[in-house]
Amino acid sequence: IEVIDEISRQLIFSSLDDKDAGEVLDKVDDATFGEVIEDLTNEKITDIVATMPPDEAADVVAELDDLQTEEVLEHIADEESDQIEALLKYGEDTAGGIMTSDLVQVKMSEKISGAITQIRNADPDDAYFHVFVVDDEGKLKGTVGLITLIRNNPDTMVSYVLEEGIPAVGVSADQEKIANTFRKYDLMVMPVV
């Protein structure tokens, strides 16, 4: 889509459903992104943003002018709008700017059966490999992998199978620090605190 003429791009893009259009917007370079967005109505942008994960939606909304941003956020579900607005507060090259708020979080005091239920009720389009475990105040205490959840008794408390001491980064950490931490600890996911 980046190497074709504008008319062809408009035709192809208009033939995509909102979810596919969101995936394309997330992948194109900045110049193409600007050209595509310019041709879309705010209603169409809203429909596309509503299908995207919060972190990707925030990237799209961040490129809109203030009036478009306001209109798009007004017309999507409150929970999604709140997540996107929270992500927009962080610089785009920081952990806060690239993190996602789509995750499964359980309290230490829950049973494994509750964690499994939350995974089952989570967005089916997202892949969850870990459950983040917090205390009663919402402070991160560790993670539990899916295999651990499956292999243990559903009546076991999450606190008994908790993996503590997981690496985390602050919201203002830059992408280089994040990448180095992922490499150093061979991580698939990393909490941003």
Image: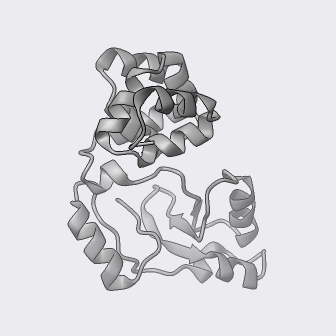
Q: Residue at x 49, y 31 (%)?
A: 8
Image position of 19 with respect to 76: above or below: below
Residue 178: horizontal and vertical position, in percent? 28, 68
Image position of 82 with respect to 2: above or below: above
Q: Specify whether residue 86 is in view.
A: no
Q: In this image, 56 relative to 173: left or right?
A: right
For the residue pair 191 and 30, the one nearer the viewer reads as: 30
Residue 125: horizontal and vertical position, in percent? 66, 53
Q: Quadrant of residue 59?
A: top left
For the residue pair 3 and 28, the one nearer the viewer reads as: 3
Q: Quadrant of residue 127?
A: bottom right
For the residue pair 130 and 1, the one nearer the viewer reads as: 1
Residue 7: horizontal and vertical position, in percent? 46, 26
Image position of 8 with respect to 23: above or below: above
Q: Specify whether residue 160 is in view.
A: yes
Residue 95: horizontal and vertical position, in percent? 30, 57
Quadrant (top left/top right/bottom left/bottom right) for the C terminus: bottom left
